Image (cartoon, rainbow, N blue to C red):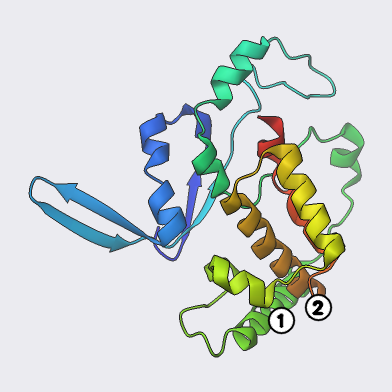
Amino acid sequence: AHRGVLFLDELTEFKRDVLEFLRQPLEDGYVTITRTRQSVVFPAQFTLVASTNPCPCGFYGDSVQPCTCTPRNRENYWSRLSGPLMDRIDLQVVVSRIKPEEMTQHQPGEASEPVRQRVQTARQRAHERFKAEPKLQCNADMQSRHLKQWCPLDDTNRTLLEGAVRKFGLSARAMDRILKVGRTIADLDGCPDLQTHHIAEAIQYRTIDRMQ
């Protein structure tokens, strides 16, 4: 999946040790395979896309079908995904049941072409930003030391971010990733500076952190 997409369906059905193996490539972009007396390092920069049910029965939080799981069932279910692994998943979104009228009315969404143009423009902004840093190709490549330079926080943004970290028990890694996502949202928005609504939107993408 190097330079591609790794899609894992039913994420919580994988063995925990298999999922934990994803931590190194998600963080460092490479994977180390050790066999007997030899270790080999392979590049592993990929986009992870994963899906899973919200609980064993699949209906926790559903607006129609009641959940039949106990709190302990749900706790054990989510315990298969460790905190350090979830820290490395930047965009976490709950997909709710589609209403019948939404399926029958066929309301057109945004066309692909303007989305593509917006993404290309945002990537160009990132390239311009990092032209003096050849190892940085996109916002996700930033390290903590880069965030102070390219994701400076005013008092309002700092208060918002610190409040979210306290409320949801987020780690330092999750906080850094919120800033990277916020910087990307600002680029897509065409804003040179990181604004409060960019930080707020990035925090909203830590959905699973709030559920656990």
Question: What residue lies at 81% left-to-right and 78% top-to-bottom?
Answer: 190
Q: Secondary structure at mark 1?
A: helix
Residue at the spot of label 2: 190
**Residue 121, which numbered label?**
1
Marks 1 and 2, Cα distance to the nearest angstrom?
Answer: 8 Å
Question: What residue lies at 50% left-to-right and 42% top-to-bottom?
Answer: 85
Report crowding for label 1: few under 14, some 14 to 19, many 20 or more residues within 10 A (C-alpha): some
Report crowding for label 2: few under 14, some 14 to 19, many 20 or more residues within 10 A (C-alpha): few
Q: Is residue 48 left or right of residue 189?
A: left
Q: Nearer the viewer, residue 106 or 187?
A: 187
Amino acid on which the number 2 mark rests in the picture: Gly
Tag in front: 1 or 2: 2
Residue 156 pos. (x, y %): 87, 61
Above or below residue 115? Residue 61 is above
Q: Secondary structure at mark 2?
A: loop
Q: Which quarter of the figure is the N terminus placed in?
A: bottom left
Above or below residue 54? Residue 86 is below
Q: Is residue 34 left or right of residue 89?
A: left
Above or below residue 101? Residue 53 is above
Above or below residue 193? Residue 99 is above
Residue 203 pos. (x, y %): 75, 51
